[in-house]
Image (tube, grey):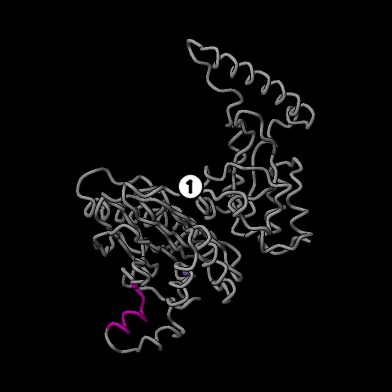
Amino acid sequence: MLRVVEQAAFSDTGRQRRANEDALLARAPLFAVADGMGGAKAGEIASRTAVDVLGLGVEDGIVRSRLVELVRRANREVHEAQLADTDLTGMGTTTTVAHIGPEMLTIAHVGDSRAYLMRDGSLRQLTDDHSLVEEMRRQGRLTAEEAAHHPQRSIITRALGPDPSVEVDVREFALEAGDVLLLCSDGLTTMLPEAKISDLISRNQRLDTAGRALIAAANAAGGRDNITVVLVRIGGLDDDVVDAVPDEDEQSTAVHPAVVPAFDEAATVAGSQAGATIDEVRARLEEEGGLSTPLAPRAPRTPSAARRRRIKAAILATVVTVVIMLGTGWGATRVTYFVGTSQGYVAIYQGLPYDLPFGLRLYRVVYTSGVPIASLTPAQQDRLLGHEPRTGQDAQDLVKAVERGELQ
Ligand code: MN
């Protein structure tokens, strides 16, 4: 009996693209990456659509066929969306999705994103790229070396979206405790040789540090494309489950510890919102009028003494909240945003940047950019992380400037 004991997921715009058209899913037992393509926002919509469909999940039963059905459904949705809107014509996305079962790993795959399995220090590619260059290499018409540097290596021969139906590769692999699964977009594998990828995974004990190291290395090598990395460690029932959020002292020292409160980073799967365009987020911000964070815990029916104490504390916290809200003009504007970091990335929060006693929080992440806070200068970090209450528009403009590299 095996299970997921640790996971980390990151998506980064890279250093040359303006937008991140990759999307990811990290919700055990399903993990996926999708690399969208198409003009304007079409690529982002394609990859997001695929990941949203995959997020519906597979019920118990024959995982293999259900996973294929899910990918086919994702194909139909991307295909129909592009038929319905001329702005989306020609959009498509890769998809590599993994299901972690109690013994077996099942992978369904279309395109040139990849799945790898790291076992006993060696990295093995589990998927075949559906790309022109890789097909020529498999036919012996190109050497591996020629394929790696071929100018047409980004041309893919299979994707979700272009056709009403799609051929899906599906494979099963027996899992072992200690295995690490890597799903990634080609923004990682075209920038880094496999030896480097393997080295960074083995050298970092934690998957979140390994994931950050992979993204940083791909960026250091040029970051020519969006980079997405999903890492999953498999263990037995006796193995400890590693918390998704590292301890404070393990976090990057480049993030200002003094001004970054203990945000509920676990609530946000890194990168899960990175595929949304700022306009989509704007639409979402406009739709949502209120703060979803509960201001007081649900009152129990028959309160014990301890519970009564907690209720009193909650009432006190609520009073404090109201005072803070009035003091910051929250009541007048109804909704306040601020800019902070989530898992090391510049993010927009809705709410107020305060923690109240008893774990009450007044904020939540509404948008995560692909920009690591560590990539900004100390002066830029100061500008961003002051946690001043902002309007939604102001927060978006600020983060947009960061994404465009135009922040002073
Ligand atoms: Mn790509």
Q: Quadrant of residue 34?
A: bottom left
Q: Position of residue 212 (x, y in %)?
A: 54, 62
Q: Quadrant of residue 201?
A: bottom left
Image quadrant where one finds the C terminus: bottom right
Up-down relation of residue 361 to residue 210 (above or below): above
- Number of numbered discs: 1
Visible residue check, residue 86: yes
Residue drawn where x is 76% and y is 59% of the image:
380
Q: Position of residue 365 (x, y in %)?
A: 59, 43
Residue drawn where x is 52% and y is 59% of the image:
11
Residue drawn where x is 73% and y is 32% of the image:
333
Tell me where the magenta segment starts and ends, as one range: 129-138
- SS state under label 1: loop
Identity, as a three-letter code, of the amino acid under mark 1: Asp
Q: In the image as oriented, which residue stretches furthest toward the top?
A: 302
Visible residue check, residue 85: no
Residue drawn where x is 61% and y is 25% of the image:
295
Please give left or right for residue 338 compared with residue 74 in the image: right
Q: Position of residue 147 (x, y in %)?
A: 39, 84
Q: In the image as oriented, which residue stretches furthest toward the front?
A: 238
Q: Position of residue 157 (x, y in %)?
A: 34, 73
Which residue in the structure is indicated by mark 1? 243
Tell whether position 131 is magenta: yes
Q: Residues within 10 Å of mark 1 (few under 14, many from 20)?
A: few
Up-down relation of residue 19 to residue 80 (above or below): below
Q: Quadrant of residue 24?
A: bottom left
Please give left or right for residue 46 compared with residue 158 in the image: right
